Structure formats: C-alpha cells, structure tokens
Image (cartoon, grey):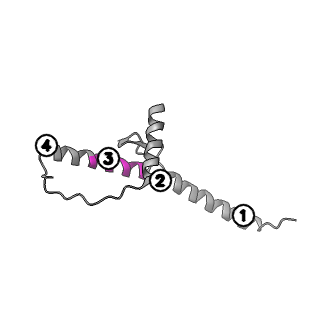
Amino acid sequence: MFLFPPIEEQNQILEFLRWKTSVFNGLIPEKAITKGNVIASSKSLLAREMMLIDEYRTSLISAAVTGRIDVRDIIIPEYTYIEEEAEAEEEEDLATEEV
C-alpha cells in the first residue's frame, strides 16, 4: 500500500519542480568550453559569463604581448600540482584528440 499526498499538494510539488528545472536549464550552456575557446551560445547566463571571461583572458594576453601592461615584475604564486588534475587533463587531451 502506498500513501500519496493530496492531488493539490502533488500539483504544487510538480509546479515547484518545473520552476526549479527551468531555473537550472537557464544556467547551463548549450555547448561547452574547450581549451579556452568558447563555443557556447549566449542563450544562458552561464554561457554569457563564460564568454565574457574568455574575452577578458584574450584581451589580457593581448595587452601583455603588445606591452600595454608591464608583466615583468609580476610574482606568480606557488601552485601545488595535484595528481587528480593531471589525470583529468590527460583524459581531456585524449578526448580532444579522438574528435
């Protein structure tokens, strides 16, 4: 024997879940980012943010290369390389090579 909430409560739950799903769908880009090249459309908020970050990265590199900003005295903080990251990068490289 199964107990279910009243139909009105079921409808409220369903309406809430549909709303939450639409919110999450609006955050997920239609396509992914590959090695810094944005191939996502700007139909979602997250995709737009990723494209803006990629544009900023490109303009920062351009400014450093052309001498508009001086990067000679920049101190790069220590970075501890984690084995899990290395494995993830290797898998990503293999997946890119197969395509």
Give whichever of discs 3 and 1 has the lower sequence position. Answer: 1
**22, 77: nearer the viewer:** 77
Give whichever of discs 4 and 1 has the lower sequence position. Answer: 1
Identified by mark 3, the residue type is Asp
Residue 56: x, y in percent?
Answer: 27, 49
Identified by mark 4, the residue type is Thr
In-image side of 30 versus 81 (left or right): right
Tell me whether the residue at label 4 lies in contact with that at label 1, contact meaning CB atoms closer than 8 angstroms: no
User: Residue furthest toward the right?
Assistant: 1
Residue 48: x, y in percent?
Answer: 38, 49
Q: Which residue is mark 2?
A: 27
Q: How far is mark 2 from mark 3, CA to CA?
A: 17 Å
Identified by mark 1, the residue type is Gln
**93, 82: nearer the viewer:** 82
At horizontal 82% and vertical 67% (from top left) the residue drawn is 3
Front of the two marks 1 and 2: 2
Front of the two marks 2 and 3: 3
Q: How far is mark 1 from mark 2, CA to CA?
A: 26 Å
Front of the two marks 3 and 1: 3
In-image side of 14 versus 47 (left or right): right
> Residue 10 has which mark?
1
Q: How far is mark 3 from mark 1, CA to CA?
A: 43 Å
Give whichever of discs 4 and 2 has the lower sequence position. Answer: 2
At horizontal 37% and vertical 49% (from top left) the residue drawn is 50
Secondary structure beneath dot 4 equals helix
Q: Residues within 10 Å of mark 1 (few under 14, many from 20)?
A: few
Q: How far is mark 3 from mark 4, CA to CA?
A: 18 Å
> Residue 81 has which mark?
none
Residue numbers of the magenta segment = 46-57
Residue 95: x, y in percent?
Answer: 48, 37
In-image side of 17 versus 49 (left or right): right
> Residue 66 has which mark?
4
